[in-house]
Image (tube, rainbow, N blue to C red):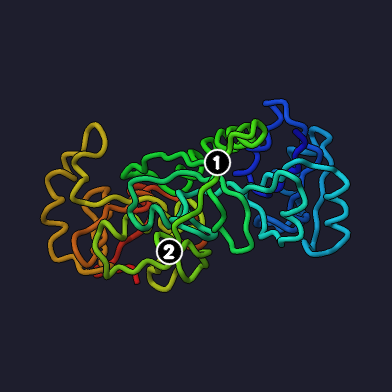
Amino acid sequence: MTIVFMGTPEFAVPSLRILLDRGHHVAAVVTAPDKPRGRGQHVSCTPVKDFATALSIPVLQPENLRDPSFADALAAFHADLFVIVAFRILPKEIFTIPALGAFNLHASLLPKYRGAAPVNWAIINGDRESGVTTFFLQEKVDTGSILLQRSVPITDTMNAGELHDVLMELGAAAVAETVAMIDERRAVPYAQDDALASPAPKIFKDDCRIVWDRPAHAVHNFIRGLSPHPAAWTTLNGKTVKLYAAREADIMHGAGPEPSAVASSVTPPVREGLTPGMLRAAGDTLFCGTARGAIEILELQLEGKKRLGGAEFLRGYRLAEPAAFV
């Protein structure tokens, strides 16, 4: 089978790799244009382009997906199928080119979490399960007929980065299986139930600000749902603080093989009287109040400083009383 693969980030690379490993002919790769990336804003190419060029696979990087020259270039490859993993929204005149259609890999169990950030929202909302879906493209985003789904549990401590990595590998296997189903004419797509749909909109910086006037479990889910990127944030004395890891104080005793004697003896009184956002230290443990209960802060980064564990932060930062995240 001849395939054109479309993808941009690291998430897409295992899917491209497995298609090649399974002996499919990937005639070309389509990815985002080179652009400034990272802190230094050096011009660089996408992870998918890096992988493809190392194997001498032709790469297309269209600025405008509706440019007729792009459609002509794709048609010249005579692909049987387009496989899309973490790419842009394709116009109908593009995804209808191949005879066997075009399918997308999405990092949720559709129709749940249609949109740009399904991994983050699943954890923010406290879901116990996630997964991947392959589906044929339609004009309306993430609404096409489902080909295959695979699910995984979400643990209480898993963050968005960890779930991303699990789904990246699970998704690659789903892509390979879906291509085999289509190639062998075994695919039986079925329509999504729009009544069960939920959104997963793109997350911007302002969306990442922690609202401390929420229960501890919700704050904990919010922090891990945005970790390590784009990262939940708050402020302390006018400076931005990013929080990467926390846990509910009520479950602290069960975390780790040997809780410290100091933490075990002082945790209950330390939590008493903590209002939302209020900080309190007990030995080398940092707590913050919420609307109901408290969280222990495990990893954070003060503006202009390096990322630190909670204990390390307390050793280097004088926590004035009263102190509070805002």
* Element carrying mark 2: strand
When asked about the image quadrant of residue 260, the answer is top left
Q: Nearer the viewer, residue 111 or 288?
A: 111
Number of the front mark, 2 or 1? 1
Residue 124 point in image, percent of width and height: 38, 57
In the foreground, 270 or 46: 46
Give residue 117's position: percent from left, percent from top: 51, 57
- Return the residue nearer the eye: 233 or 106: 106
Looking at the picture, how far across and down is residue 52, in whole percent?
77, 38
- Answer yes or no: is residue 14 visible: no
Residue highlighted by disc 2: 233
**Residue 278 visible here:** yes
Q: What kind of residue is marked 1?
A: Val
Which of 54 and 153 lies nearest the eye of the viewer?
153
Secondary structure found at label 1: loop
Instruction: State if disc 1 and disc 2 touch (CB < 8 Å).
Output: no
Q: Distance between the residues labelled 2 and 1?
A: 45 Å
Mark 2 belongs to which amino acid? Trp
Tell me: 232 left or right of 250.
right
Mark 1 — residue? 188
Q: In which quarter of the image is the C terminus?
A: bottom left
Q: Image height check: is 308 above or below 273?
A: above
Q: Earlier in the sequence, mark 2 or mark 1?
A: 1
Q: Which residue is drawn at 55% across and 41% down?
A: 188
